[in-house]
Image (cartoon, coloured by chain):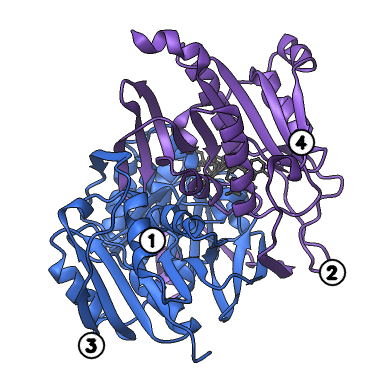
Amino acid sequence: MHFLEDARTVKILVPVKRVIDANIRVRVKPDRSGVDTDNVKMAMNPFCEIAVEEALRIKEAGDAGEVILFSAGPSRFQETIRTGLAMGADRGVHIHTDEPLEPLVVAKMIAAVAEKEGADLVILGKQSIDGDNNQTGQMLAAIMGRPLGSYISEIKKNEDGFAITREIDAGLEKLQITSPAVVTTDLRLNEPRYASLPNIMKAKKKPIEALTPEDIGVQVSHRMEILKVVEPPAREAGVMVSGAGELVDKLKNEAKVI
Amino acid sequence: MSDETKVLVIAEHDNAALYPGTLNTVTAGVAIGAPVDVLVAGHGIGEIAAACAAVAGVARVLVADHEIYAHPSTEEVAALVVANGGDYTHILAPASTFGKALIPYAAALRDLQSISDISEVVSADTFVRPIYAGNALATVRCADPVKMITVRTTAFDAAAAQGGGASVENIPAAAATGQVQFVEQALSASERPELTSARVVVSGGRGLQSGDNFTMLEQLADRLGGAVGASRAAVDAGFVPNDYQVGQTGKVVAPDLYLAVGISGAIQHLAGMKDSKCIVAINNDEEAPIFQVADYSWNEDLFAAVPALLAELEK
Ligand SMILES: Cc1cc2nc3c(=O)[nH]c(=O)nc-3n(C[C@H](O)[C@H](O)[C@H](O)COP(=O)(O)OP(=O)(O)OC[C@H]3O[C@@H](n4cnc5c(N)ncnc54)[C@H](O)[C@@H]3O)c2cc1C
Ligand SMILES: Nc1ncnc2c1ncn2[C@@H]1O[C@H](COP(=O)(O)O)[C@@H](O)[C@H]1O
């Protein structure tokens, strides 16, 4: 059982992002510059919660020794790291910047920290629910030259690395990938735990290392310019129908879709 | 738009047939400029290459037909895209799980920032894309020399599958690292049309209560020549497989007719279907948010409504 002994030195890095809570209805700013984030409830991106949970389960199964959280953004992002520490992660790394970040830049930052920490596995969310980019994990794998397991619903450590199952458009796909690796989480991977009160207290004492992009040698470039952000055309509510006959008649003769 | 544009579309297929989303992606490519070439990687794909060459608007088809591409990994296709993508100003793929994994990976290999899920081409460097589950539309300009793009296929018409006469050229396989081994696929076999391009979609939610009850929706879909979809809650509960999920983090559909049965209408679900031409909702809660976007709302118990609808359609 050679990897049981190694397991204590295995490190998992989990990048977590702070986003507007999934239950909040977002509002576009009147000046069309973006979405209003003032006094809006924020939360950890749901796919990142799933990533944290999976990292903790791998550690609890004895296949890893340490779970390190990563977040890049304004100082408020430390609260999101704290949320993951309260779930049970060991420590955090916060890259402090007030600049808007594009996925390629975030991926470069994660790569720098993963190298520095010697992370064996990086687990990201598949998508941030604000920008809906679905890019960072793929870019990280490419930058680091590591195998990519995107949209996973299962991951198991084995002698050759990791056996993963991916959710793809046509169903499920199983792959074997070598370690070290980069994976991104899909919804069915697990159900994240809630932080218990004692763990929330404990998390306050866990270390968060604060660094700047310069500290890790990453330049914050901007290749994308947001020209405007508008609301999509609203759909009007239609009419109530009261029976199958009426519905079929309307679909045939009014909407002409059947 | 500009004389210098050169567009490459990465075809999606399963070695048996070209996926329809490829045709919509060609239309997005044509909107950007010309020429539009197509790259197709697979194994035993002579007919698919021919199908690509027949698509109206395509100039050249690059074919990598090799056994290593029978079930290619993201990194293998990306290596091919990088090896053959040097001349192109725009590289596009459908915003499917295939394209969404591929394009950012290939972009990062070339130090490019990709653009996800475009729903409109404004100009060769400016695009519209939905953000925040489609609650906002961002117009973005990309300064990178090459635009790496995934395309929301429901936002573009399909290019004509016939009428083109592209040249077909074989390209060699590209070296990859061999860090990813294909093991197996468990695919949902279905005779019904593919969900993202079906003309009719019948979706069920938590209200269906079980996988068995989806049989009713299958009958309805078959009667209407449609596909079956689901909400996340129905997938999470195990009623239907993951590939049925419609929404912000599942599939985006925009059929002529979308029937939402026992689905509440959370924003994450609406994100995947609110561009449908006609929406019908069946729900026993008159306050259900789905009614706010439905053209025809039927406030009824689905276990009474669906059989009645089936009976009416049989008449
Ligand atoms: C990160 C994230 C991503 C997500 N991505 C997606 C996504 O891609 N797609 C998606 O769909 N959701 C997604 N969701 C989940 C979404 O927020 C909702 O939880 C989900 O859509 C609810 O599914 P539902 O409408 O089937 O269930 P519910 O909200 O429970 O609604 C069930 C409905 O059925 C009705 N009903 C019950 N019984 C009957 C009956 N007998 N007759 C008629 N009506 C009945 C009820 O009135 C109710 O309106 C996501 C959530 C998060 C946080
Ligand atoms: N600023 C950030 N800080 C930490 N992790 C991030 C950040 N942005 C993106 N990520 C990670 O990348 C995943 C995918 O994000 P995206 O590519 O933006 O959709 C997220 O779920 C996070 O795991």
The circle drawn on residue A211 is: 4
Mark 2–mark 4 Cα distance, whole angstroms, equals: 33 Å
Mark 1 and mark 3 lie on one chain; the one further toward the N terminus is: 3
The circle drawn on residue A31 is: 2
Q: Mark 4 vs ligand 2: CB under 8 Å? A: no
Q: Are marks 1 and 4 in contact (CB under 8 Å)?
A: no
Q: Secondary structure at mark 2?
A: loop
Q: Chain of mark 4?
A: A
* Mark 3 neighbour class, 10 Å CA radius: few under 14, some 14 to 19, many 20 or more: some
Q: Nearer the viewer, mark 1 or mark 3?
A: 3
Quadrant in which ligand 2 is drawn? top right
Chain for colour blue: B
Q: Nearer the viewer, mark 2 or mark 4?
A: 4
Q: Secondary structure at mark 1?
A: helix
**Mark 3 — residue?**
B165
Mark 2–mark 1 Cα distance, whole angstroms, equals: 34 Å
